[in-house]
Amino acid sequence: MNFSRARRNLFCTVTPFKYLRSCWTACAFAGFLPLPALFMLPGRDTAQVACVYLGLALAWLATETFRFDGLPVTYVAWHAKMLALWIAVLANVALFIGLGLSVGTRSNLPFPLMAALSATPALGLAPWLSLRVRQPYTALILGAMIVGSLKLVGCIVARLVYGPQFDELGYIAGDWRTAKLMISTFWGLTAGLSTSLLLADWWKFKRQNIAAHQFTSRATPS
């Protein structure tokens, strides 16, 4: 069997829908987890707390998706798992936003934008940690620590810019009207880090795929 035929067969057996079917219970649980906070918490903190639960649930979903059937070692397997994860995350975020808007959830930062930003660690940071730590709950803890440290960086930036009274003046509060710099720094770093790690994994597996293709081409007689 030549390389192109073997590759086509591999694509047929490893598809994102395979992982979606196998991880549907985890996907459903991740979608349900933030809903009690969204529906039951009163006041203006509802959106923030619910988005924290959403981010944690989707990061857990990422580790479960990568854990199923073993961690990916080929570009085809990684690509299929990432597609499955993106489909599941986008579906859960869309459901979360729709339900939140239907019950009138309000936040100073637009609620759909806050929900979308909360999902970014699950699309880059969590898969990257899963591949290297190889322990899902350790990856979750490390991911939470990294995201927390990025928020601390945002607070430090606010301190440097606004001076010693930055806390009393509300520059590190969860209010977009007074803490634009801290919130922008935090979410910008979070989204940038997740995107960078996603691209790093893509390039790693893509290089392996190219190297394997070149090796097979040299080994196969013409």
Image: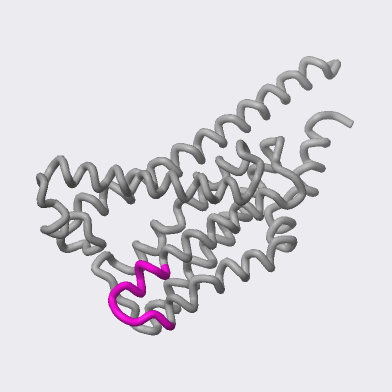
Above/below status of 216 relative to 170: above
- The image quarter containing residue 10 is top right
Q: x%, y% of residue 190?
A: 38, 47
- Quarter in which the C terminus is drawn: top right
**Front residue (pair 137, 9):** 137
Outermost residue, right side: 1
Q: x%, y% of residue 109?
A: 27, 65
Q: Does the magenta segment cover residue 81?
A: no
The structure's colour scheme is one colour
Q: Does the magenta segment cover residue 43?
A: yes
- The image quarter containing residue 70 is top right
Q: Is residue 155 left or right of residue 127?
A: left
- The image quarter containing residue 175 is bottom left
Q: Residue at x 24, y 68 (%)?
A: 108
Magenta extent: 40-50
The total number of labels drawn is 0
Q: x%, y% of residue 211?
A: 68, 22
Q: Is residue 65 left or right of residue 7?
A: left
- Quarter in which the N terminus is drawn: top right
Q: Residue at x 72, y 24 (%)?
A: 212
Q: Is residue 199 left or right of residue 10?
A: left
Q: Residue at x 19, y 57 (%)?
A: 179
**Front residue (pair 219, 194):** 194
Above/below status of 220 relative to 127: above
Q: Residue at x 21, y 62 (%)?
A: 176
Q: x%, y% of residue 33?
A: 54, 71
Q: Is residue 152 left or right of residue 214?
A: left
